[in-house]
Image (tube, helix red, strand yellow):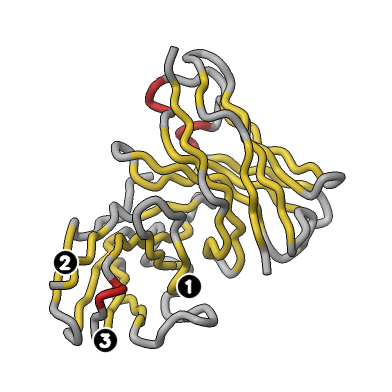
Amino acid sequence: QVQLQQSGPGLVKPSQTLSLTCAISGDSVSTNSATWNWIRQSPSRGLEWLGRTYYRSKWYNEYAVSVKSRITINPDTSKNQFSLQLNSVTPEDTAVYYCARNNNWSFDYWGQGTLVTVSS
Amino acid sequence: QSALTQPPSVSGSPGQSVTISCTGTSSDVGSYNRVSWYQQSPGTAPKLIIYEVTSRPSGVPDRFSGSRSGNTASLTFSGLQAEDEADYYCSSYTSSGSYVFGTGTKVTVL
């Protein structure tokens, strides 16, 4: 059974960097058959896919256009986890952030969610 | 990428058949068999209930079914039950290599 465990701060100041980590058990971040994603949810923006990292003989990262200039998703093979960094945050980035595995073009396992509030 | 369009709410009595629509474009829903549906209860993460338009993951009741016609996908409850009361979201892979979600539908069991 795949499990995703998120960690990271719930409060970030405006203009600073949001950082979250997703620890994987029951699968490998280096698998050739899935991708590892970050998704957020807020009342104003609904569910929004942010980006993914995946391994297919080499590492790939792909990001949503809306956050492409501010986002980095990195795998950490030594700890079997992946991370999200979102720079220069504003109150509009306040949301519940989820990590999720994508397999068969769908998100089949999700983390528990982290409410991140951007406020001074 | 604009969100896929879903009705804000639908309702039905127990045992009734109810359908939720999910309208996209030829760049997402209409292009690929890569539409999925999720059930979300308050305070919890979304749960996958339909993938690749029509397939159900192991453990998902067969009263949930998916279909697609053109740029619109649909989720049907064949025999609504009280425990089906939740928010439902569709999602599609897009021609730009990203994913887009629907606006969400609240299902109420009367």
Measured from the top left, where is residue A25 in percent x and y?
A: 73, 58
Of B51 and A113, the residue lying toward us: A113
Neighbours of disc 3 within 10 Å: few (<14), some (14-19), many (20+): some
Q: Helix or strand or loop: what does disc 3 sit on?
A: strand
Of B107 and A68, the residue lying toward us: B107
Neighbours of disc 1 within 10 Å: few (<14), some (14-19), many (20+): many
Q: Which mark is residue B51?
A: 1
Q: Is residue A26 above or below residue A120?
A: below
Dot 1 and dot 3 residues touching (CB under 8 Å) = no
Measured from the top left, where is residue A41 in percent x and y?
A: 40, 43
Q: Which mark is residue B36?
A: none
Identify the residue at image location x=27%, y=80%.
Answer: B77
Q: CA distance from mark 3 to mark 2?
A: 14 Å
Q: Helix or strand or loop: what does disc 1 sit on?
A: loop
Q: Which kind of residue does numbered mark 3 sit on?
A: Ser
Identify the residue at image location x=29%, y=52%.
Answer: B103
Q: Which residue is mark 2?
A: B10
Instruction: Please state if A29 lies on the left or on the right of A19 as rendered.
Output: right
Which chain hosts label 3? B
- For residue B18, which quarter of the picture? bottom left
Q: CA distance from mark 2 to mark 1?
A: 21 Å
Instruction: Please state if A104 lies on the left or on the right of B14 as rendered.
Output: right
- Which corner quadrant holds the N terminus of chain A? bottom right
Measured from the top left, where is residue B48 in percent x and y?
A: 47, 67
